Image (cartoon, rainbow, N blue to C red):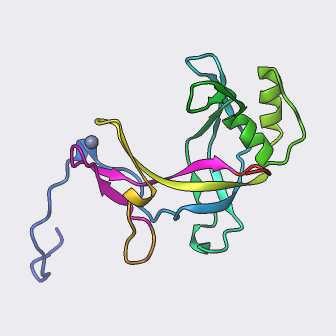
Amino acid sequence: MADLSGLNLRPQAPVDWDTYEVGGGVGPVPPEGEYWGQAPQDFTFSATEEGALQVLIDPITLVNVEKHPQFEGYPVRFTRASNKLKTKKDGTARNASMMGDYLLSHGLLARPQTHEEYAQAVEMTAGRVFPFVLGNEAYCKDCDVTLRGQQIGKGEDGLPLTEVLCPKCNKTLRVNARVRWFVTPKA
Ligand SMILES: [Zn+2]
């Protein structure tokens, strides 16, 4: 057995091997702003509860990053967009959807109307590069509370904090990079 008696060791903190956290720790998160993203090669389609077509665009890879080049290749995870029409503040439908915004951010000329046409148009974006606005978000699923932007704060390096406390239950929440909106030609 190795003789460690000469080493200046302190008592080791206990680890619960049953709930061991596999994988990397909490890495830096890209700050909010406009970025270029590269679409994945494959998309997963599903139906929302309301029967709209929803696509999972995962991951969106940051490319051509100028201001914060350390985030070149950063994967923005779990982006979903549906073709359900957005609603105005008065509850009436807008002539726009998140999926429509996604397609327009690619400058696609397709004008889909059916679910099949939407899916076909989304598949044409595979591997293509498009502009979007990235936001920082931390979500507490116990309290259904989402912290965004200014509520998250920055570290000494000027980057967003990687962890924040839930204002309701005080649990540590991980800060994630999310698509805030797709940049369309008129936006
Ligand atoms: Zn909470």
The quarter of the image holding the N terminus is bottom left
Q: Position of residue 150 (x, y in %)?
A: 42, 60
Q: Quadrant of residue 126?
A: top right
Say whether residue 25 is visible.
no
Residue 176 to residue 63: above or below: above
Magenta includes 72? no
Say whether residue 6 is visible.
yes
Identified at 52% across, 64% down, the residue is 30
Magenta includes 161? yes
Front in this rendered view, residue 6 or 31: 31
Identified at 67% across, 73% down, the residue is 66
Q: Position of residue 158 (x, y in %)?
A: 44, 75
Residue at far right of view = 109
Q: Could you tell whether 80 is left or right of 97 in the image?
A: left
Q: Position of residue 7 (x, y in %)?
A: 14, 81
Q: Could you tell whether 149 is left or right of 68 in the image?
A: left
**Displayed-image quarter of ligand 1:** top left
Front in this rendered view, residue 9 or 28: 28
Residue 26 to residue 93: above or below: below
Q: How many numbered marks have been drawn onto this rendered protein structure?
A: 0
Front in this rendered view, residue 66 or 44: 66
Q: Could you tell whether 76 is left or right of 97 in the image?
A: left
Q: Position of residue 63 (x, y in %)?
A: 69, 63
Identified at 52% across, 65% down, the residue is 31
Identified at 25% across, 49% down, the residue is 167
Magenta range: 160-182
